[in-house]
Image (tube, rainbow, N blue to C red):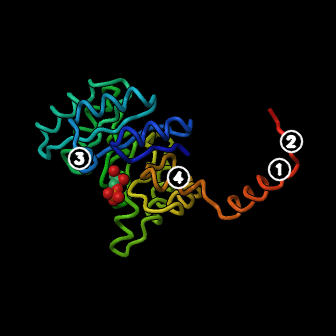
Amino acid sequence: MKFFVDTAEIDEIKDLADSGLLDGVTTNPSLIAKSGRDFKEVILEICKIVDGPVSAEVASTDYETMQKEADNIAGWAENIAVKVPLTEAGLKVCKNLSDNGTMVNVTLCFSTGQAILAAKAGAAFISPFVGRLDDISQDGLQLISDIVRIYDNYPDFHTEVLVASIRNPMHIIDSAKMGAHVMTAPPKVIKQLYKHPLTESGLAAFVKDWAETGQSIL
Ligand code: G3P
């Protein structure tokens, strides 16, 4: 499973990139607004830190303007994945960009039907939002399982399932069990994967016992 981080904060991205476990970055207009930084400037900085796909999202909703924005963003760096919303205009733009070899991440996916359309439009990634479905008492992870199963039926679909809107470690673990290709999560949730109380208490005991031997490895 590929690990993307869902943030536009440079320090957080650098920290995770240093772990060697980071395969890409996703951003959205809300995360850019939260960073308080210039969109292009921050995306270019991220693209230099991470070799893998960096998602940068269009802001317009009409086809013509969206296509212009997408063409512009696509030229910013080699590892850009242009992010478009799952709308008729978004999927038209997706098809145009994909035909020209640009990676596209189709976002705001909430149904299997939408996921089929995105695959047919040549998306590199489909982003179903599990947390936002859970928030309205629908089963976000069931959607992931259904999309993975549907895509598996069609070898000519090359779209990767990118689990988005992740709220907790179980969203990541369950998506991995289902065979989702990629997940994107806030740094805090990725860090939670390291944690286990038995690891912490076990390590404390090893440190204490080792100190009592009076030895040094170096
Ligand atoms: O970037 C898309 C997605 O991950 C947003 O998550 O937490 O705003 O629902 P959230």
Name the element at disc 2: loop
Q: CA distance from mark 2 to mark 4?
A: 32 Å
Q: Earlier in the sequence, mark 1 or mark 2?
A: 1
Q: Earlier in the sequence, mark 3 or mark 2?
A: 3
**Residue at 29% across / 36% down in the picture?**
82
The answer to whether 151 appears left or right of 69 in the picture is: right
Proximity of marks 4 and 3: CB atoms separated by less than 8 Å: no
Q: Residues within 10 Å of mark 2 (few under 14, many from 20)?
A: few
The answer to whether 116 appears left or right of 182 in the picture is: left
Direction right: furthest residue? 213
Name the element at disc 1: helix
Q: Which residue is mark 3?
A: 29
Q: Residues within 10 Å of mark 1 (few under 14, many from 20)?
A: few
Proximity of marks 1 and 2: CB atoms separated by less than 8 Å: yes
Name the element at disc 3: helix
Which one is closest to the eye, mark 2 or mark 4?
A: 2
Name the element at disc 4: helix
Q: Which residue is mark 4?
A: 191
Counting from the top left corner in percent of width and height, residue 141 is at: 47, 64
